[in-house]
Structure formats: C-alpha cells, structure tokens
Amino acid sequence: MGEEGLGEYAREQIERARSDPRLKRDKRAAIADFWDAIEEAERVRMLGILGLHELMHTLDRHERELGVRHDDADLDLNTRGMLQAMWERVESSRIEIEHGHPHLNAQALLSLVSALDAMVEDLARSWRGFRVEPVVDELLSRAQEQVPEAVDTVKPEAMATLVEVVTDEIARRALGRAQRLYGCGPDRYERVLAQVGLSAPEDRPLPDGLVKALIEVSALRDVLMHRAGRVDLRAMREAPTLPYRNGQLVRASRDDYRRYSSAIRCYASEISFRGIRSWPEVNDADDGPNLEHWDQYHLIGA
C-alpha cells in the first residue's frame, strides 16, 4: 500500500500532479508540453468520473455510519436533512453517469484541441528558429567581438528577448511571415507545418477517418467555446459529417471522447514523427504511429 505499491503509470501521474513538469520549461518544449497537457486533461477527467461513481455510495455510507435508513419514519429533522442532501448527490451522480458525463468529456476535448493548437504553433516557431539559428549565432558572435562592453551590459532576460525578436525578424525575411492557425481539421495545421518543412509526406497520407474526426472535433471546439454548445450553420458547413442539426445541443458521449482523443493523440504523434523520420536509427514501420489504426490511440478505459 501507499507509495511502495504504485505502478509505473500511477507513479508518473501522481508525480506530475504534485509538480507539473511544464512549470520548469519555457515554451520551446512544444512536444513535451503537449503530452503533459493532455495527461492533465485526461487525469482530471478520469478523477471526475471516479468521483461520480464514489458519490453513488455516499448515502449508503452515511446510513451505515448512523445506523438508520433515509426512509425511516422517526428520523430527526437534522438527520433527515443530511440524508436528503446525500440522496440528491447520489441522484445527480447517477444521472451524469447514465448520460455519459458529457460535460466532463467536452471540457477534456477542449483542452486536447487547445494543446494541439499550441504544439503546432510552438513547434513551427521553433523550426523557423532552427532554420535561421546559424545566422543569429553569427550576428551575436560579431557583436561580442566588435562591441563586447555593450553586449556584457545586457541582462540575460533582455538578451533572451532580443535574440527571440532578432530570430523572428530574420525568419520572416528568409521564410516569409509565419502562418497562423485558422480553419478546421488537418488543414488548420498543415499549412503552418508546411512552411517549416513538416507537412504530411506523400508516403504517409492521413486516412479519411482520421481527417474526418479531426474536422469534427475542430468544429465542435468552436461550438463549445463560442456557441454555448449549440451547433450553428458554420459548424455544419465545416464538418458536414457531424451528427447534429442546426441549433442542436452537443452532448459529447464517451464514444465521442474516445474517437476524438484518439484522433488528436495519433495526429500529434505523426507530427512529432515527421521531424525525426530521416534519422538513421528511425524505422518508419516500428517508430511511426500506425495511422490505419488511429482510432485505437485513446487511453485504455477512457
């Protein structure tokens, strides 16, 4: 029991909950930040679901502790009021579980899409920086040689900001203005990735099912964020395969969560793989995500 009984995955979850690894990083750790972000979202969703199931037993526990039943005729007013509150918690939890806890699913999906957006933007920014890094290093070296007294007076924080600004400007002149995220599904990300040489390779096309799931979850993200969960005509145009009518309220089921979280996880893995697949020690078949089985990338028990 206790710390000694933790398995590897449970220990990792608890350690991340105690001290989020992202607190010790800057925004350049795009891929690591993505996986930590979705781990937190899925961990909190799981705790919410477990909490609902635990609340289902709260009335029984209190009745056993007090040695009474909520339908006893001779309960005093205070006990009756407390047990009534317990009954209400049980009933609310039962209904949430029966309906598949759609709000917990939706909130987690919002976090997952947000994490994917951030990963692509930060990854593209980092790769733009890599492309012009030699030029920036040369400029800094020349500045150190020619005006060392001026360079030495710049505080480290200010120097880091200066390097970032110079890097962005050189990248803009050499590669063009950085693309921004807009649109729906893979197109939202691929135009940004293409600018830094990380677009989908011809020999690893995205399966139609994965593309459709990414389009749907992108449209649902906008609906949940900006339309209070009611599908509008824009969402229907962007994602015509959504099983909703105009004005209908989105209720994200557990199956929805598994499908969409699988799509995000698999696609993020594929993006991460593109940058290393040319390495000599990397084998496409063994190291790259299995795109044909993208729908199996959800957590076990999600």
Image (cartoon, grey):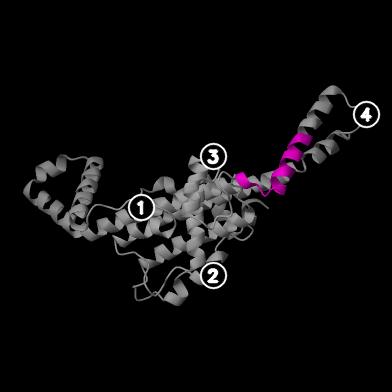
Residue 290 picture location, percent across and down: 50, 71
- Bin the neighbour count of mark 1 within 10 Å (Cα to Cα): few under 14, some 14-19, many 20 and up: some
In magenta, the rendered stretch is: 87-103
Q: Indicate which disc, 2 or 4, sits on the residue closer to the N terminus.
A: 4
Direction from residue 115 to residue 92 in the image, left or right: right
Query: Residue at point 50% right, 64% down?
Result: 210
Task: Please tell me which residue lies in front, 61 or 122.
Answer: 122
Q: Which residue is mark 3?
A: 228
Residue 79 picture location, percent across and down: 83, 27
Q: Which residue is mark 2?
A: 293
Dot 2 amino acid type: His
Residue 110 picture location, percent across and down: 51, 47
Dot 4 amino acid type: Ala
Determine which of the numbered discs, if any, sits on residue 73 in the image: 4
Cα–Cα span, label 3 and label 1: 26 Å
Dot 1 amino acid type: Glu
Determine which of the numbered discs, if any, sits on residue 121 in the image: 1
Residue furthest left as drawn: 146
